[in-house]
Every structure is written in structure tokens, then in C-alpha cells.
Image (tube, helix red, strand yellow):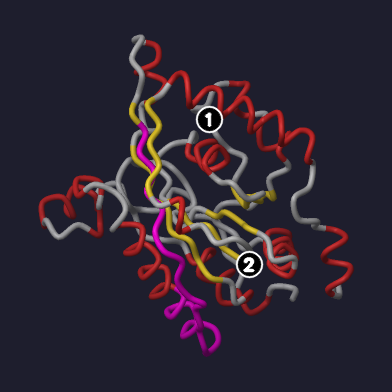
């Protein structure tokens, strides 16, 4: 088990500054000149962390939008599998040094990195839905809630609308409109118990996180959190987590 100093040395906050400067500059140029990019709620971003940034996830471009909009250095926990992304985009996680999470399993590396970043009062982004296989809100996986509980960080909800199908519009010489809404920070979150009881509580907290995000995206994107039964029914058809057939380690067994 690594102590705090060893964790921080192994997982430094605001790393790889030169590469990230060029990535952010490139993304900012792209979003400013090739899209209609609107941001609401920048004043809700705290001056300092620890903050867990929790956006919805409809498209592989969502992480790029977050990098562009965040004025604070932001680390990411995310999967590297982006089969529908252009080849140059698939290189970004390695260049940016995203901390990998293996979908469908608990990740000791991700948890250690999260703890280290929060101890440095950093900003860490994780997508609660843990994938972008549909363009409506789906249930949260327990990872975001688990990290929030374990680190005691507040959460910053972000709603992203317009990235889905963005490149199709660009190929048709359209400038896609992308709207970002940033909510007010909330938390910290707590969860007691062990095993199944703790997992159930984490699922409840994940639901709470998604409701905060729901308030930041248009009604037709609310998916399984919609007040419209017809929209909920349609969303249920795509709500199942595609990687559920993989084994998931019990959370209490993670190396703290």
C-alpha cells in the first residue's frame, strides 16, 4: 500500500504540461472556429479542488469538450477504447496521459490516481455512465460515486449537448452547435456498509449524480431519467451496460 507522498509522486496533478498545452490549444482552435460552442455556468467552477467533474457521455468528443472548457488543469479517468473516433483522436489519451479504467472491472490504478489527485486539491473528470454507446442519459456505474465517497471530494455536474453526430455535420459543411451547462458543485457524498449494502448505496448516489446532470441537458435527452414514460421506455432499450459480462471486483477489496 502506497503512502500519501508515494501516491502523489506516482500520480502528480497537472502533469505533462507541454503536451497538454498544445492539445488544449488545438482543441480550443477547433471548437471556436468549426463549431458553435456555448458555455453556461462558468462561474460555478470552483477556484480550487478537490473537485470531481462529472459530465454526461454521448460521444467520444465529450472529453475534448471538457478539456476546452475547463480553466483549471483537469485529469481524466476513462477507457481507451474509442472504435468510432478518428485515428488522430485515439492518440489523445496517451498524449494527454489519461488514467485508464478497464470497463466492467474495478481499477486499482484509477482509484490510486483519484486519491492522489484529490490530495493535491486537483480536478478530476470521470464520466458516470462509463461509456458513450447511446445519445440519451443512462444509469450511472458505481465508479464516480465510489471515488467521490472514498476521497470526500465535491462534485461538479456538467451537461453536454451537441457532440453526438458532430463529425457527420462537419463532413456536410455544417457547424454543429455544442451547448455546455455547468451546474453548482454538490457533496461530499457518503456511503456506509460493506458488500451488497454498500453497492446499493453507491447505486443510489450514482442516481443522485445523474439527476444533477439531467437538469443540465434538454428534456429529450433525459433518457431513463425522463418524466415522459415513452422516452423512458425508448431509453431502456439502450440502457444496458455493454461490458456487464466482465467480472467486477468487490469494491471493498481494492488496495487502499
Question: Dot 2: within a 10 Å radius of its alpha carbon, few (fewer than 14), some, or many (20 or more) residues?
Answer: many
What's drawn in magenta, residue-wise? 178-202
Q: Earlier in the sequence, mark 1 or mark 2?
A: 2
Left or right relative to 123: residue 85: left
Q: Residue at image x 73%, y 42%?
A: 97
10 Å neighbourhood of mark 1: few (<14), some, or many (≥20)? few
- Residue 188, x across and y down, in percent: 52, 77
Query: Eyeballing the image, is 122 above or below 65?
Result: below
- The magenta stretch spans residue 196: yes
Q: Residue at x 48, y 61 (%)?
A: 156
Residue 245 vs residue 90, the one in the foreground: 90
Which quadrant is the N terminus positioned in? bottom right
State left or right for residue 170 relative to residue 116. Answer: left
Q: Position of residue 224 (x, y in %)?
A: 25, 57
Q: Is residue 200 above or below residue 136?
A: below
**Residue at point 39%, 15% (across, down):** 170
Q: Nearer the viewer, residue 245 or 240?
A: 240
- From this viewpoint, which residue is outermost toward the bottom? 193
Q: Looking at the image, is mark 1 or mark 2 nearer the viewer?
A: 2
The reply to whether the magenta stretch includes residue 237 is no
The image quarter in which residue 89 lies? top right
Whole-angstrom CA distance, mark 1 to mark 2, is: 32 Å
Q: Which residue is mark 1?
A: 83
> Considering the image in quadrants, where does the C terminus appear?
bottom right
Q: Nearer the viewer, residue 45 or 164?
A: 45
Tell me the residue at 63%/74% (across/down): 151
Residue under pointer 2: 50
Find numbered disc 1 in the image and state the secondary structure of the residue it sits on.
Answer: loop
Amino acid at each position: 500500500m502506497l503512502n500519501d507522498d508515494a501516491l502523489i509522486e506516482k500520480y502528480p496533478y497537472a502533469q505533462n504540461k507541454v503536451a497538454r498545452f498544445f492539445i488544449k490549444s488545438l482543441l480550443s482552435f477547433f471548437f471556436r472556429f468549426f463549431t458553435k460552442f456555448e458555455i453556461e455556468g462558468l462561474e460555478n467552477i470552483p477556484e480550487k479542488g478537490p473537485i470531481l467533474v462529472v459530465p454526461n457521455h454521448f460521444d467520444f468528443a465529450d472529453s475534448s469538450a471538457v478539456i476546452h472548457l475547463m480553466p483549471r488543469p483537469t485529469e481524466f479517468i476513462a477507457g481507451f477504447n474509442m472504435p468510432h473516433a478518428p485515428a488522430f483522436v485515439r492518440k489523445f489519451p496517451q498524449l494527454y496521459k489519461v488514467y485508464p479504467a478497464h470497463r466492467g472491472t474495478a481499477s486499482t490504478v484509477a482509484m490510486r490516481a483519484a486519491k492522489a489527485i484529490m490530495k493535491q486539491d486537483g480536478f478530476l473528470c470521470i464520466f458516470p455512465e462509463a461509456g458513450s454507446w447511446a445519445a440519451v442519459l443512462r444509469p450511472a456505474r458505481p465508479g464516480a460515486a465510489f471515488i467521490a465517497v472514498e476521497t470526500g471530494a465535491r462534485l461538479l455536474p456538467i451537461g453536454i449537448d451537441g457532440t453526438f453526430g458532430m463529425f457527420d455535420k462537419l463532413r456536410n459543411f455544417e457547424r454543429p452547435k455544442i451547448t455546455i451547462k455547468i451546474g453548482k458543485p454538490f457533496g461530499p457524498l457518503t456511503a456506509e456498509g460493506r458488500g451488497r449494502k454498500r453497492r446499493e448505496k453507491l447505486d443510489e448516489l450514482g442516481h443522485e449524480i445523474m439527476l444533477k446532470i439531467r437538469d443540465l441537458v434538454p428534456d429529450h435527452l433525459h433518457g431513463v431519467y425522463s418524466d415522459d414514460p415513452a422516452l423512458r421506455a425508448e431509453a431502456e432499450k439502450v440502457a444496458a451496460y455493454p461490458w456487464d459480462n466482465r467480472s467486477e471486483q468487490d469494491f471493498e477489496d481494492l488496495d487502499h
